[in-house]
Amino acid sequence: MSLETLARSDVIETVEELETLYGKPGTTSLVKEIDHIIPAYAAFIKASPFVTLATAGPEGLDCSPRGDQPGFVRIHDERTLLMPDRHGNNRADSLKNIIRDGRVGLLFMVPGSGTTLRVNGRAKISVSLDLRSSFTVEGKAPRSVVVISIDSVYFQCARAIHRSRLWEDAAKVDPKSLPSPGAILDELSRGAIDGKHYDEEWPKRAASTMW
């Protein structure tokens, strides 16, 4: 069936229709959401080496990966998180969005755990020298630190992780079975970018710009 031919009756257009289909959330789905970090939630943040950061701006939405050593997102207090912005591709899509619309969403993941932690809040970008210096790794400080004021925090049940078998060795894909970044750039640039050279140089380039 072509999506263009969907009848109006096949599309949910109101919250009431959605709730009729899915029902209301149970008590456990609601009681877990609070406006501050408790010790149990702090444990996940301190153990997490990987976070996705969702932002919104005039050009649209963005969801960006953030990774570092476990606990790289620092708990300043029960309602404030600090996240260093490490070296990247300089597109700064997330940061541009934060400047114009401070709303953010974070999803913390911990390798081996099915439980994830979600944080919603509002962010601002700090270039305080003292704050940046406190996140120094291998002599390099981040260029900025994202300061997140928490509106809500709650854990997400493990169904998605279990369904995807994300942490199982048997589910891992051989990277060679997928197009390499260089091959993609070569195709999109119609050969203007030497994809093979890009891939060969990436390990050295990444090692020198990790922080």
Image: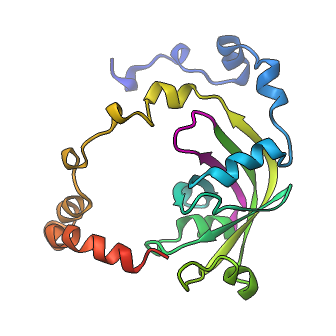
* Left or right: where 2 falls relative to 48: left
Image check: 82 left or right of 176? right
- Look at the picture and state if 191 lies above or below 138: above
Image quadrant of residue 199? bottom left
Where's residue 136, x and y in %?
62, 80
Which residue sits at x=62%, y=64%?
A: 97
For residue 122, side relative to residue 198 (left or right): right
How far across and how far down the image is residue 181, in percent?
A: 26, 60
Placement of 183 over or under 134, stated as above or below: above
**Magenta span includes 108:** yes
Q: Residue at x 56, y 25 (%)?
A: 159
Depth check, front residue: 52 or 172? 172
Q: Where is residue 11 shown, x and y percent of the image? A: 54, 20
Residue 20 picture location, percent across and down? 70, 11
The quarter holding residue 203 reads bottom left
Magenta-highlighted residues: 100-115
Name the foreground residue: 136 vs 36.
136
Quarter occupied by residue 60 = bottom right
Number of labels in the image equals: 0
Q: Nearer the viewer, residue 191 or 176?
A: 176
Is residue 162 on the magenta stretch? no
Q: Which colour style is shown?
A: rainbow
Q: Compared to 121, does 19 lie above or below?
A: above
Q: Is residue 204 left or right of residue 10?
A: left
Q: Residue at x 59, y 71 (%)?
A: 85
The quarter of the image holding the N terminus is: top left
